[in-house]
Amino acid sequence: MAKDPEKVKQGKKNRRIGGDTERRTRKLLEEEGWFVSKFQNKIDIKKEEMVAAKQGRFRMTSTGFPDFICWKREYKTYLQEEVLEMIGVECKSDGILDKTEKAQCEWLLENRVFDKILITKRDKIKNKIVISFKDFENYDGRIKQENVLDRLNKDLLCYNAQIIEHDTHLELIVSANGGKHKAQLPKDILERYYSYTINKLIREIKMITVKSAYD
């Protein structure tokens, strides 16, 4: 069956624009100090697992989602140490995700594959191509992840610990050696990078447990 010439032409145009958007996005990320690589996996929503992405035509591209995996080391004040940040970036000329892509983003964040996922949008302003980024957590104005404090407390159950939020601070309570031991934490520990927050709290719990053994 002969292909529609107009559809073929539009398809070539879309691929050209898509490739250009990816190149511009990579350049912007690298200028910000990120190491950038193509992501070679995607999420099988029905099986709820990560699988290898199929290779594109002529093995030149990958159908991985999101497009890029990016990482860099950065000092975090609330942790008082340098940490490795890892984010996913999906390049979209129109900034729009379909239903399957949204579901994949949610799975990736819930399973902590990435600290966050950014979606790009391509605009032409005064004859200049501008690439903007939007955090998936605020995609369409909706928060996609459950409350960070609730998530933390779920994970802290196995350590016999919990966090209680006060107006000015957080209180970490650890049950150890037949008693309850408390530590005051700054509120900014609930900042965006959840995976590092839980690691910080685990270290706090270990310190409290060791200290309580000598009380």
Image (cartoon, grey):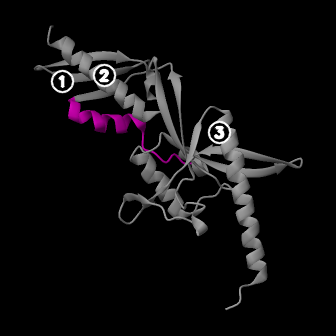
Q: Residue furthest left?
A: 178
Q: Amino acid at mark 1?
A: Ser
The residue labelled by disc 2 is 203
- Relative vertical location of residue 160 with respect to residue 17 in this rendering, above or below: above
Residue shown at the point (49%, 52%) measured from the top left? 105
The residue labelled by disc 1 is 175
Quarter of the figure that contains the N terminus: bottom right
- Relative vertical location of residue 11 with respect to residue 162 in this rendering, above or below: below
- Relative vertical location of residue 191 with respect to residue 80 in this rendering, above or below: below
Report helix, strand or loop for mark 2: helix
Q: Residue 80's image quarter?
A: top left
Report helix, strand or loop for mark 1: strand
Q: Residues within 10 Å of mark 2 (few under 14, many from 20)?
A: few
Q: Residue furthest bottom?
A: 1
| The residue stretch that appears in magenta | 142-160
The residue labelled by disc 3 is 29
Residue shown at the point (52%, 28%) measured from the top left? 73
In the image, residue 69 lies at what x, y percent? 53, 45
Front residue of this view, candidates 45 and 189: 45
Front residue of this view, candidates 42 and 95: 42
* Upstream in sequence: badge 3 or badge 1: 3
